[in-house]
Image (spheres, coloured by chain):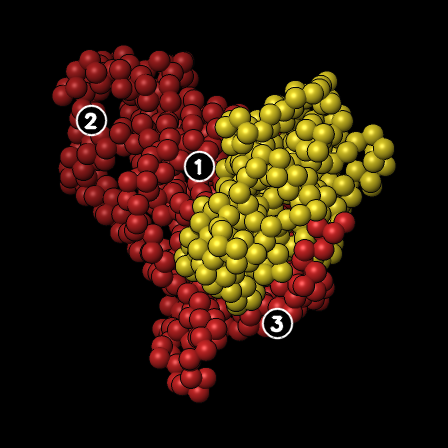
Chain colours: A yellow, B red
Amino acid sequence: MEVPTVAAMVAAGKKPEIVFWVGCAGSFDERAKKITKAFIKILSQCQVSYAVLGTEESCTGDPAKRAGNEFLFQMQALANIELLNAYEITRIVTACPHCFNTLKNEYPSLGGNYTVIHHTQLLKQLLEEGKLVLEGDQFKGKKITYHDPCYLGRANQVYEAPRSLIQKLDAELVEMKNCKAKGLCCGAGGAQMFKEPEKGKQDINIRRTEEALETSPDIIAAACPFCNTMLTDGVKNKEKSEQIQVKDIAELIAEAQDL
Amino acid sequence: MAYLPNLIFGLMLVGALALFVRNINRIRKNIALGRPMDRNDQKAARWKNMARIALGQSKMVTKPIAGLLHIVVYIGFLFINIELLEIVLDGLLGSHRLFAPILGNFYNVLIAAFEWFALGVLVVVVIFWCRRNVLRIQRFCKAEMQGWPKWDADLILYFEVLLMSLFLLMNATDLSLQLRGVEAYPQVGSFPISQILLPLFEGLPTPTLMSLERTFWWMHIVGIFGFLNYLYYSKHLHILLAFPNTYFANLAPKGAFANNPVVTQEVKLMLDPNADPYATPVNDTAANQKFGASEVTDLHWVQLINAYTCTECGRCTSQCPANLTGKKLSPRKIMMDTRDRLTEVAAHLRQTKSTEITDGKQLLGDYITPEELWACTSCNACVEACPVDIDPLSIIMDMRQYLVMEQSAAPTALNNMMGNIENNGAPWPFNSQDRMQWTQL
């Protein structure tokens, strides 16, 4: 798969219109890599002028900050900002709500000012501009429930872009009892992804999966690689992996496009 | 001696107000123990936030039943306070229903409206009591609600029943005397609710009825003076603090956590190849500032006003994913602990006449345990749920910062994650040179 890097483009005297911030999960996690690839396929098909930072990309610092290590967060942030500013980057898209939130909200006061959008927002925009056309009826009659990632929804009020994409798929969007501003966390945020949960009666991802299963969906749509992992584990735990898929919205769109 | 009641009333009024002012000043001083935080920007947006959330109760109605019931009590409370003005003036001047001749027919409308509000408040307060004590709604019965918090919640309801009942009894006896044509009780007002109580007083001789009327009148106003000064010791302070609390609330997106400027200074120095590593720090106070929070005095003043504003409704805790799945963390407890410790620290400082806290306790450990702090997913459900814009999450994050940056006391798994970020720029042990490997597959 040919993926342009910012360094190569700049060396060739060009500049991408938008940088795709892949994120750690999207780069290294087996499941999340599939989301990255699905999104890349859509970007290429829509002929978006994009590039990735590749080996120059580094953790935004989100998990360090939320774990309490402000020092490490700012080390990461300032280094990333130096890189992005050196390339004169103005627009960033990312498929990870944690990267999205940090780049958008926490970098400006450290000197990093970019227009940052989530991949569901870019996909919606491409649809509206007519660059992305959804045909076919793979999802017709399928029930899809959408899980709001905390850092996309409550943290940044992005509720509609992902939902409008699901509706464009001609699928039936079914809401969980806790959705949008009241959406229950998948359990991964605040650096929980990287540690064992504290003692309790239940794991959070199991509870959220139960809420999703109550809607008896064919697909649980996610818009965050970490939520995806947590819900996939939850569905496995409930022994429903055969019947129910957990998919990122970019994957659903790529599938609908036969990419 | 004719002016004795006026004098007694005047003294009680001054006493109650003086005590109230002392209490409010104490709260102001306690809040000022927090670190500075500039929340004087975006004034228009702040007024709007306050009008919408505190005055307009917009976040209350996200739970429609509790929200609407609360609005009845809230509006009742606001309106009946107008009547209070007349009662106070009557008490000072020795008059009786001073506003009646001035307002004419409108007075009847007002009194009738107050009576309907009083009935509304009474009914709702009984429902509230049942929600806590009969239905035992889960969020009112969590671990942190045992003991005094439970008492406090019930006491407030009893207070309100008492005040509303006295108000109606006062009107009923007044009406009864009016109907008997007693000279001191001219026929004014309209009493749609208290007239139902008339049969209670039918057989009583007029002098007894007059002393009853006076007793109810005095008990009602003394009750109000008492309630006013109970606020300080109670979770009920929200009736006042909800307003400044929503005004000074964080208006940034909920996902934006503040960046510590002292850390920025240090990191910039580290990344600057021209910096002299042996130079004395220019800003010594900044360098000595402790990272994060282990004590209430490490929190900023808005976090402290948050703590006093909390009325322990538990909406935060009922939405917290950690609490819902049986973890120890309860955002409401974080706020209650902060408030209780702040009150304790303030009393200790007053007693020792010092600025150093030497009681051998602190917020972290003695009140809030690391286990609670590490259970948080930073999902912002608690912040979203709070009807008065309290932010428990910021306190949790500040305390985590202290644990990690001052004590290196992160859970091992998180230390590994942070080590990975430091070494490979990713939370997992993957080589940063492999970041493009996904393109090969």
Residue linked to disc 3: B408
Q: Are marks 1 and 3 in contact (CB under 8 Å)?
A: no
Q: Residue furthest front?
A: A12
Give the spatial CA distance, label 3 vs label 2.
69 Å
How many residues crowd mark 3 within 10 Å: few (<14), some (14–19), many (20+)?
A: few
- Horizontal placement of B181 versus A169: left or right? left
- Horizontal placement of A177 versus B440: left or right? left
Which numbered disc, 1 or 2, marks the residue closer to the eye? Answer: 1
Q: Position of residue B405 (x, y in %)?
A: 55, 70
| Mark 2 secondary-structure assignment | loop
**Which numbered disc, 3 or 2, marks the residue that appears first in the sequence?**
2
Residue B159 is labelled as 1
Q: Name the quadrant containing residue A72.
A: bottom right
Tell me which residue sits at (48%, 35%) in the image: B157
Q: Chain of mark 1?
A: B
Q: Residue furthest bottom?
A: B278
Give amino acid for label 2.
Answer: His
Q: Position of residue B382 (x, y in %)?
A: 55, 44
Tell me which residue sits at (83%, 30%) in the image: A243
Q: Chain of mark 3?
A: B
Q: Position of residue B386 (x, y in %)?
A: 49, 40
Q: Position of residue B95 (x, y in %)?
A: 17, 29
Say if labels 1 and 2 share a chain.
yes
Say if labels 3 and 2 share a chain.
yes
Residue B96 is labelled as 2
- Horizontal placement of B142 versus B272: left or right? right
- State whether residue A94 is above or below residue B426: above
